[in-house]
């Protein structure tokens, strides 16, 4: 069997981490290397991780000072010896057949990446589909287009099994929010073939106090920067279709953020910056023949009325 390295970054999640690790330990695909990176936890998370390692030789726990999610994932990648990589956030969990199913999909389709569906789960037990329940195979370029426009692959890093070779020269940006937005598209683009199955086998916990529940100027700056870098990345590679989609996504996100914050007087400086970013991109969209006229018209309307 081929070895799969599962990377779990951990920081102060003593209430949830047992379920996460147990779901990986219980995988029906047994040849696993389970790398837990304890990123300076100050609660009982460290002890829980060490206890699991004492019971299962496949588990390796790395303790490091707190450096953030990206640094923890990067440590895991550098320590991994498997031919494939899979990521699980420490407050989430996976179905017992997740790794086996994704590996079989990759093997049968000769793909470089396999992705599964994601289910949101709230503290009260309520669930909601995060992705669509469909299936497809496509090349890397089309996979990036699907990531930008669809609700299947998504930009998240955690519901995908990757060939390790795709990660050469790629790492997560340290001290940035929305680290997946800086990273996932590069991996998809490198893949010769990507397969997606909508079966919901990754469970994404929704909780108060998580990183994703926070809204800040830094978070907004990072997500917009990630999207702008995406435009530059594909513009440099002359991938006009992807660049056009990236521009549309970027401008739509500026509008989305503006609608959220524009009524808050304390955010007036941010609103001016958003408008400046929008206008700068607006002046360039007419040079891209792949952006539909209807979108250009919508851009003009928003520029005038900012609804």
Image: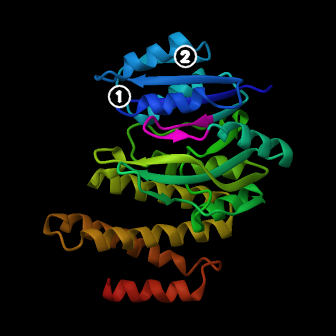
Which residue is rendered at x = 45% and y = 71% of the image? 251
Q: Is residue 277 left or right of residue 241?
A: left
Q: Are marks 2 and 1 in contact (CB under 8 Å)?
A: no
Q: Which residue is mark 1?
A: 14
247 over 205 or under it: above or below: below
Q: How is the image coloured?
A: rainbow
In which quarter of the view is residue 293 placed?
bottom right
Q: Position of residue 41 (x, y in %)?
A: 33, 24
Residue 212 visible, this angle: yes
Using the numbered discs, state the Cα–Cα distance from disc 2 to disc 1 in whole angstroms.
Answer: 18 Å
Q: Nearer the viewer, residue 157 or 176?
A: 157
In which quarter of the view is residue 43 placed?
top left
Q: Nearer the viewer, residue 299 or 238?
A: 299
What's the magenta region?
A: 86-95
Q: Position of residue 129 (x, y in %)?
A: 52, 60
Q: Main secondary structure of the magenta part?
A: loop
Per the image, is 128 magenta?
A: no
N-terminal label among 2 and 1: 1
* Crowding at mark 1 (Cα within 10 Å: few <14, some 14-19, many 20+): many
Residue 64 visible, this angle: no
> Which mark identifies residue 116?
none
Q: Position of residue 222 (x, y in %)?
A: 39, 52
Residue farthest to the left, as pictured: 265
64 over 146 or under it: above or below: above
* Crowding at mark 2 (Cα within 10 Å: few <14, some 14-19, many 20+): many
Q: Which residue is mark 2?
A: 60
Which residue is rendered at x = 36% and y = 50% of the image? 212
Q: Check disc 2 and report its element: helix, strand or loop.
A: strand
Q: Check disc 1 and report its element: helix, strand or loop.
A: loop
């Amino acid at each position: 069997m081929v070895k799969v390295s599962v990377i779990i970054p951990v920081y102060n999640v003593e209430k949830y981490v047992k379920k996460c690790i147990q779901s990986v330990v219980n995988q029906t695909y047994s040849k696993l290397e389970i790398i837990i990176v304890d990123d300076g936890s100050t609660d009982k998370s460290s002890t829980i991780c060490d206890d699991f390692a004492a019971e299962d030789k496949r588990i390796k726990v790395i303790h490091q000072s707190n450096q953030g999610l990206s640094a923890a994932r990067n440590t895991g990648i550098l320590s991994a010896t498997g031919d494939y990589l899979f990521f699980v956030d420490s407050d989430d969990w996976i179905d017992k057949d997740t790794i086996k199913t994704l590996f079989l999909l990759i093997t049968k389709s000769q793909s470089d990446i396999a992705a599964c569906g994601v289910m949101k789960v709230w503290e009260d037990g309520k669930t909601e589909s995060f992705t669509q329940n469909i299936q497809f195979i496509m090349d890397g370029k089309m996979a990036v287009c699907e990531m930008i426009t669809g609700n299947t692959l998504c930009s998240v890093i955690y519901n995908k099994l990757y060939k390790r070779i795709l990660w050469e020269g790629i790492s997560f940006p340290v001290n940035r929010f929305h680290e997946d937005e800086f990273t996932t598209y590069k991996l998809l683009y490198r893949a010769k073939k990507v397969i997606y199955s909508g079966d919901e086998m990754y469970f994404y916990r929704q909780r108060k106090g998580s990183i994703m529940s926070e809204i800040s100027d830094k978070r907004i700056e990072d997500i917009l920067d990630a999207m702008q870098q995406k435009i530059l990345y594909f513009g440099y590679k002359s991938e006009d279709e992807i660049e056009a989609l990236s521009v549309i996504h970027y401008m739509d996100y500026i509008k989305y953020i503006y609608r959220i914050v524009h009524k808050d007087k304390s955010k007036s400086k941010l609103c001016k910056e958003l408008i400046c970013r929008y206008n700068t991109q607006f002046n360039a969209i007419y040079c891209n023949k792949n952006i539909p006229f209807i979108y250009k018209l919508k851009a003009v309307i928003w520029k005038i009325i900012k609804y």
